[in-house]
């Protein structure tokens, strides 16, 4: 089924639609055959409605998806690290963020560093004290809070220069198991760790000091600061987004939207928001062969864009991430609403983005 | 250690052959979980699988495997953990360093396990495994979190050790389930939501019913706030779930609970309808019936019958049914039969526009209409003008001699264009280019003389001024541009030398001439088809005083068959004067 489909066409356009020569050194125009399953995805289709043979997978009225930068596997400054042991967990960069000014910040924990890129070009590296961090948050003062949820079960605060400024234990009140942490957030009142993709636990104050009484928020704060967002898988093919006002987090949640997917949901992969209050829900969806559960017939990673009122505005359908390397944060949304996906291929890491 | 590890693949082959000969021992899922929990905290030990039940002596790993360094006796790698907690292919104590399978075996063989679908089919104690190109990983599945991200037990790697937590995975991992699992107090999770069934079932679950009561067997739960989610842990098998909510009909579903797994069983409730006609005389009662109907010419609005104005074809005034206004007319308009009409504004005005496109009246000759709509004496403004109408009263300031044109009130010479023209007036200066012979008639458009048509007769002549009584008998001077009428119908003007010609049906005709400053005169002339008749006319100049006598005579000359002559015309005014005298 897949073999006859069209090979992935990679777009090399900037958001404005013009070729950006600054990306030439790190982007490639050729089709990527390893990791991107040929035929699943043709970016040029996403200016409108994209359907597979049976169902509407996504629609993206005024946007397009483009690959904007690639990094080969490796350890030099223009590379990102991967580990793929013979008998153990394979890893790529575990998380990334895009700052308000557009810097791409990648947690390259395999190489023990955080990489900062501007327009695809390396800017600086911030050393981190371990290769076991899975997420990080950027404080307003530039300080980095890194989450180690397995090895040392701690949050470590790192200065922009890479100096370790403090460590606080992860396990404690409201966090019984470090491995259940699913994200870390720097908010004005301190550092919060997400548990089980459901609730946030405040583990440190704004100075990075550990807290005896850890407060809990039922969800992630939205980028506009108004809501707490929760996403829950609901049945095999759907998910719901619940919201609560930040001012009254203990109140009853409101069902913002129920999102149906055309294929079974393997797992939700992102719940993001932008400064205008739009909400973004990403999911890895796939259909398996009924007679061979190991055989994937088709799969995608759609990002559903919801208005602040819960109306579905569009779906950006990214290519599936098919390699086994673990990552905790594969999809992010920048404050301006640009959607980013980090995907791994046999040759390196590719970052794609969709601009509404 | 490296030597031991390096033979992992060979060991797997050997172990697979051994395993094929016997069924693995029966264990329960709880056994698997218990063994997993014992292993947590132990170090990653590549190619090994052993730990202690008291949780002591974790050991440590450093470096990058397979070139890593391990200290201590205990620990496990990922496939070692899976083989040990699954107790395959045989039972082995956790303290026994026994590592029979690699991820290759788990991924590609099915000797003691079976592939299962990812997602909801995964049950605690199953495993997730990948193996590609000599690399692989395996984890023991616990459950999924809110996003569906698996929570797993795994010996993750040298830096991590054996840990429990959420692990985001891709489709490269497949699910496998151990054979010969003992049935034990088999329970599973049944979950769902309660929503308003709007007629489309689960296609529209957008409206939830938090607070609904959900029950099965002796268990009861309340649908939670927000998404109205509920869940039960139930024995595996079929269960009937019932949901209740005030204002809705009870709803029930039969759903199957998988052993150790989870299933969804959302329930839609339809609203119980209570007719609501309070304060309503008409319209829907909310349950598909009506609270009443309205009389003719009335419509229901918010439960009240309201008269519907009939304003079709009307733009103003009261509608004939309800008496309501159909609209108002603008300023200067009045409503008549539902239509706004312009009201003439002639009060106090005797002339000029009435505001509706008509006139309030015309002023007598010599008077003009001022801005107030009153007729006022008009003094022509001919200063500096020798000809043409004056701009105020539109009275003539004079006429130009032949060969000149009036331009902007001044006579200017004009060069006639008579080339190619033998008769009639030139198109530029309206000056005669010539006169045809009596037996021919002028085609004025071409300026060419042509034969008289056989079915018409030519009447021609000259308009001259009649001498006063006592003056000489020679012909008077020509009267230029006199107006010529035939049988009472104005027809043409004579040229600058008083000459005119016209075609008429054969027979007798009244030819009349008039010119400014002259009294009109007429003559009766007969003409035959194809023939011509001269019909000159003399005009008498109007007298400057009462004593003048003015006589106008007309005369016909015969160019064809017969001749009759009679022409005496007096103006009414002069006739009266003569009678008084």
Image: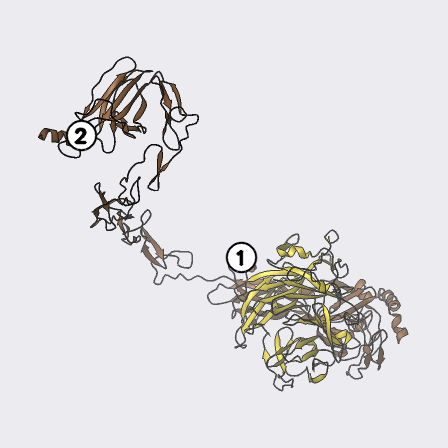
Chain colours: A yellow, B brown
Q: Residue at x 84, y 70 (%)?
A: B100
Q: Quadrant of residue A95?
A: bottom right
A89 lies left or right of A234: right
The residue carrying pointer 2 sits among few (fewer than 14), some (14 to 19) or many (20 or more) residues within 10 Å by Cα, namely some
Chain letter of mark 1 equals B
What secondary structure is found at the residue carrying circle 1? loop
| Whether residue B338 is situated above or below residue B537 in the rendered picture | below
* Distance Cα–Cα, label 2 vs label 1: 101 Å
Q: Position of residue B413 (x, y in %)?
A: 37, 36
Judge by depth and name the residue closer to the eye, A41 or A173. A41
Q: Please provide percent x and percent y for residue B422.
A: 40, 23
Q: Residues within 10 Å of mark 1 (few under 14, many from 20)?
A: few
Q: Is residue A32 visible?
A: yes
Foreground pick, A23 / A210: A23
Farthest-out residue, front: B472
Residue under the point 12% across and 29% down: B578
Q: Is residue A321 left or right of residue B448?
A: right
User: Among all residues in the image, which is located at the extreme left?
Assistant: B580
Position of residue A349 in the picture relative to residue A315 (left or right): right
- Tag 2 and tag 1 share a subunit: yes
Residue under label 2: B571
User: What residue is at 15 percent from the left and 32 percent from the top?
Assistant: B573
Q: Position of residue B541 (x, y in %)?
A: 21, 30
Q: Badge 2 sits on which subunit?
A: B
Residue labelled with disc 1: B200
**Chain-order first, disc 2 or disc 1:** 1
- Report how many numbered discs are placed on residues in the image: 2
Residue B329: % across, % down: 29, 52
């Amino acid at each position: 089924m897949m073999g006859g489909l069209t090979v992935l066409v990679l777009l090399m356009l900037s958001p404005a639609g013009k070729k950006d020569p600054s990306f030439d050194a790190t982007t490639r125009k050729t089709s990527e055959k390893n990791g991107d399953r040929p035929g699943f995805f043709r970016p040029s289709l996403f200016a409108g409605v994209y359907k597979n043979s049976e169902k509407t997978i996504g629609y993206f009225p005024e946007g397009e998806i483009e690959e904007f930068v690639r990094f080969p596997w490796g350890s030099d400054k223009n590379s990102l690290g991967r580990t793929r042991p013979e008998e153990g967990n394979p890893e790529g960069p575990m998380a990334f963020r895009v700052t308000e000014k557009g810097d791409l910040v990648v947690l390259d924990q395999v190489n023990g560093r955080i990489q900062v890129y501007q327009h695809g070009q390396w800017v600086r590296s911030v050393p981190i004290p371990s290769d076991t961090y899975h997420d990080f948050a950027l404080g307003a003062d530039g300080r980095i809070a890194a989450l180690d949820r397995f090895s040392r079960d701690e949050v470590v605060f790192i200065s922009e220069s890479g100096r370790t400024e403090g460590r606080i234990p992860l396990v404690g009140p409201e966090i019984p198991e470090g491995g259940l942490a699913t994200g870390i957030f720097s908010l004005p009142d301190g550092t919060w760790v997400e548990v089980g993709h459901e609730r946030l636990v405040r583990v440190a104050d704004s100075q990075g000091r550990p807290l005896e009484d850890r407060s809990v928020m039922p969800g992630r704060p939205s980028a506009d600061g108004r809501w707490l967002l929760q996403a829950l898988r609901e049945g095999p093919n759907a998910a719901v987004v619940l919201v609560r006002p930040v001012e009254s987090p203990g109140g009853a949640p409101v069902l913002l939207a129920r999102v149906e997917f055309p294929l079974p949901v393997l797992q939700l992969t992102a719940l993001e928001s932008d400064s205008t209050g739009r909400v973004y829900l990403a999911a890895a969806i796939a259909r398996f062969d009924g007679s061979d559960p190991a055989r994937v017939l088709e799969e995608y990673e759609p990002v559903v864009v919801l208005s602040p009122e819960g109306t579905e505005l569009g779906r950006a359908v990214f290519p599936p991430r098919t390699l086994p390397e673990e990552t905790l944060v594969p999809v992010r949304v920048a404050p301006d609403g640009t959607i980013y996906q980090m995907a791994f291929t046999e040759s390196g890491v590719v970052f794609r983005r969709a601009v509404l | 250690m490296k030597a031991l590890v390096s033979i992992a693949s060979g060991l797997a082959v050997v172990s697979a052959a051994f395993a094929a000969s016997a069924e693995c021992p029966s264990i329960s899922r709880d056994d698997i979980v218990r063994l997993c929990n014992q292993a947590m905290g132990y170090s990653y030990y590549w190619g090994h699988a052993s730990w202690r039940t008291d949780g002591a002596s974790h050991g440590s790993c450093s470096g990058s495997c397979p070139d890593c360094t391990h200290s201590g006796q205990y620990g496990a790698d990922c496939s070692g953990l899976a083989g040990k907690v699954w107790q395959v292919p045989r039972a082995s104590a956790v303290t026994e360093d026994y590592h029979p399978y690699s991820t290759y075996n788990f991924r590609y063989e099915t000797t003691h396990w079976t592939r299962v679908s990812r997602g909801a089919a995964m049950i605690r104690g199953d495993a997730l495994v990948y193996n590609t190109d000599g690399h692989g990983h395996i984890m023991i599945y616990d459950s999924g979190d809110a996003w569906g991200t698996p929570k797993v037990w795994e010996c993750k790697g040298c830096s991590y050790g054996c840990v429990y937590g959420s692990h985001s995975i891709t489709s490269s991992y497949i699910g496998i389930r151990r054979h010969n699992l003992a049935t034990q107090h088999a329970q599973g999770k049944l979950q769902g939501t309660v929503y308003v069934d709007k007629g489309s079932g689960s296609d529209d679950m957008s409206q939830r019913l938090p607070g609904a009561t959900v029950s099965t067997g002796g268990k009861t739960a309340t649908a939670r706030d927000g998404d109205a989610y509920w869940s039960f842990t139930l024995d595996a098998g079929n269960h009937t779930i019932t949901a209740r909510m005030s204002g809705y009909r009870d709803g029930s579903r039969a759903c199957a609970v998988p052993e150790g797994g989870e299933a969804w069983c959302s329930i839609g409730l339809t609203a119980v309808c209570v007719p609501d006609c309070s304060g309503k005389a008409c319209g829907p009662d909310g349950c598909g019936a009506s609270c009443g109907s309205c009389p003719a010419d009335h419509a229901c609005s918010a439960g009240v019958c309201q008269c519907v104005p009939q304003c079709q074809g009307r733009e103003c005034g009261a509608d004939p049914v309800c008496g309501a206004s159909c609209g108002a007319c603008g300023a200067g308009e009045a409503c008549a039969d539902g239509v706004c009409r312009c009201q003439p504004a002639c009060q106090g005005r005797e002339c000029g526009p009435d505001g509706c496109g008509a006139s309030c009246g015309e002023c007598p000759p010599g008077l003009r209409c001022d801005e107030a709509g009153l007729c006022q004496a008009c003094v022509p403004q001919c200063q500096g003008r020798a000809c043409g109408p004056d701009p105020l009263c539109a009275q003539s300031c004079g006429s130009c001699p032949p060969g000149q044109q009036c331009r902007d009130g001044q006579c200017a010479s004009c060069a006639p264009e008579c080339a190619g023209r033998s008769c009639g007036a030139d198109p530029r200066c309206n000056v005669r280019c010539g006169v045809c012979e009596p037996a021919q008639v002028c085609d004025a458009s071409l300026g060419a003389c042509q034969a008289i048509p056989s079915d018409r007769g030519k009447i021609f002549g000259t308009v001259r001024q009649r001498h006063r009584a006592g003056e000489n008998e020679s012909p008077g001077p020509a009267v230029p541009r006199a107006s010529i009428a035939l049988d009472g119908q104005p027809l043409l003007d004579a040229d600058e030398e008083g000459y005119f010609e016209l075609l008429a049906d054969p027979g007798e005709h009244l030819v009349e001439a008039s010119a400014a400053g002259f009294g009109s005169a007429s003559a009766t002339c007969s003409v035959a088809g194809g023939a011509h008749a001269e019909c000159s006319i003399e005009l008498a100049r109007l007298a400057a005083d009462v004593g003048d006598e003015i006589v106008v005579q007309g005369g016909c000359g015969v160019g064809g068959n017969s001749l009759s002559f009679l022409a005496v015309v007096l103006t009414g005014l002069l006739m009266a004067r003569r009678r008084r005298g």
